[in-house]
Image (spheres, rainbow, N blue to C red):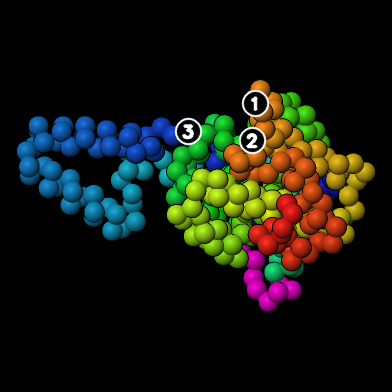
């Protein structure tokens, strides 16, 4: 993928070094609060507790979060990729090659989807890409460790990625190449599009009261649609900046490597289609190619497709 010299997104956020879950977890905060209340009560009685509560809400009223003062957590640890303050790392300028590559890839997705949404008379709300290491607090989606891999959180409408995943993608799954990495980002952007267009909410409602098998089947259609939307992005990226030989093969190799049947075989299991949540390798490749063929969102209607 020819990405050097391309426009870089301003929506990349540095979440590295936040220290994982730590005291930001509910159990840690609960324990800290209990210890603090017990100590104040032993020294000052009920009067001290009343002063503590009044002080807590007084600080909140002027925009200061006492919990952040105690734990050292909070939004100040997250810096925008294009920020330029003392001690801050500008990932899109000073980050390593992978960071700068991701800034360019996210910028490309913004260019494509802004244009596609404009064609349909609407605005594209650009999501942030949070780069973290070890673990991250993802708002309404809670705490996630790097072991979950790249993910999209509908509650925050943001993407989360530990770039260490790319080493696993190459080493464990054998999916090499920068376009394999770009496909991963484009797939998560597909989930963002599903959220802003209302598809995600419709699927969640459709899952209510259904069996696990039926819920899995709906989730597979969600994931395959995200693969198709990644293909739509690749189609338009190819026209903005012609892809290099082998780029599409890299994306298809990645899609193949993370198909449910392939992963189950790697785990020493017989593939069980009823348990699939992302689709088989063949399905994931097929829907990526469907999106890439004509670059049309309308071709990605996996929910009405009789043959996945």
Between 224 and 62, the residue placed more toward the observer is 224
Nearest to N terminus: mark 1 or mark 3: 3
Q: Secondary structure at mark 3?
A: loop
Between 172 and 49, the residue placed more toward the observer is 172
What is the span of residues highlighted in magenta in the rendered image? 118-126
At a point 71% along the width and 66% down the height, the residue shown is 114
- Decide if residue 245 is in sight here: yes
At a point 70% along the width and 74% down the height, the residue shown is 120
| Residue 305 position in % (x across, y down) | 71, 59
Residue on which disc 1 sits: 269
Residue on which disc 2 sits: 272
| Residue 254 position in % (x across, y down) | 76, 38
Q: Main secondary structure of the magenta part?
A: loop
Nearest to N terminus: mark 3 or mark 2: 3
- Decide if residue 150 is in sight here: no
Residue on which disc 3 sits: 20
Asked if marks 3 and 2 touch (Cβ < 8 Å), the reply is no
Figure quadrant of residue 36? top left
Q: CA distance from mark 3 to mark 2?
A: 34 Å
Asked if marks 1 and 2 touch (Cβ < 8 Å), the reply is yes
Q: Secondary structure at mark 1?
A: loop
Figure quadrant of residue 233? bottom right
């Amino acid at each position: 993928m020819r990405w050097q010299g391309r426009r870089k997104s301003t929506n990349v956020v540095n979440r590295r070094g936040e220290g994982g879950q730590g005291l930001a977890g509910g159990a840690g905060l609960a324990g800290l609060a209990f210890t603090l209340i017990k100590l104040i009560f032993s020294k000052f009685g009920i009067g001290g507790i009343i002063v503590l509560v009044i002080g807590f809400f007084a600080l909140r009223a002027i925009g200061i979060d006492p919990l952040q003062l105690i734990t050292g957590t909070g939004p100040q640890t997250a810096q925008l990729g294009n920020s330029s303050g003392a001690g801050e790392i500008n990932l899109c300028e000073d980050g390593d090659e992978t960071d700068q590559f991701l800034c360019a890839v996210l910028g490309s997705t913004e260019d494509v989807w802004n244009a596609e949404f404009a064609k349909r008379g609407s605005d594209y709300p650009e999501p942030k890409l949070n780069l973290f290491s070890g673990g991250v607090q993802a708002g309404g989606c809670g705490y996630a460790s790097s072991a979950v891999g790249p993910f999209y959180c509908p509650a925050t409408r943001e993407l989360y990625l530990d770039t260490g995943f790319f080493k696993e993608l190459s080493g464990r799954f054998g999916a090499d190449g920068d376009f394999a990495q770009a496909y991963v980002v484009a797939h998560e952007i597909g989930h963002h599009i599903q959220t802003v267009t209302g598809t995600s909410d419709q699927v969640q409602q459709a899952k209510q009261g259904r069996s696990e098998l039926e819920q899995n089947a709906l989730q597979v259609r969600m994931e395959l649609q995200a693969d198709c939307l990644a293909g739509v992005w690749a189609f338009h990226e190819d026209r903005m900046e012609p892809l290099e030989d082998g780029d599409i093969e890299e994306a298809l190799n990645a899609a193949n490597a993370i198909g449910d049947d392939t992963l189950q075989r790697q785990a020493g299991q017989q593939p069980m289609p009823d348990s699939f949540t992302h689709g088989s390798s063949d399905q994931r490749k097929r829907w990526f190619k469907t999106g890439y063929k004509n670059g049309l969102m309308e071709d990605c209607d996996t929910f009405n497709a009789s043959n996945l």
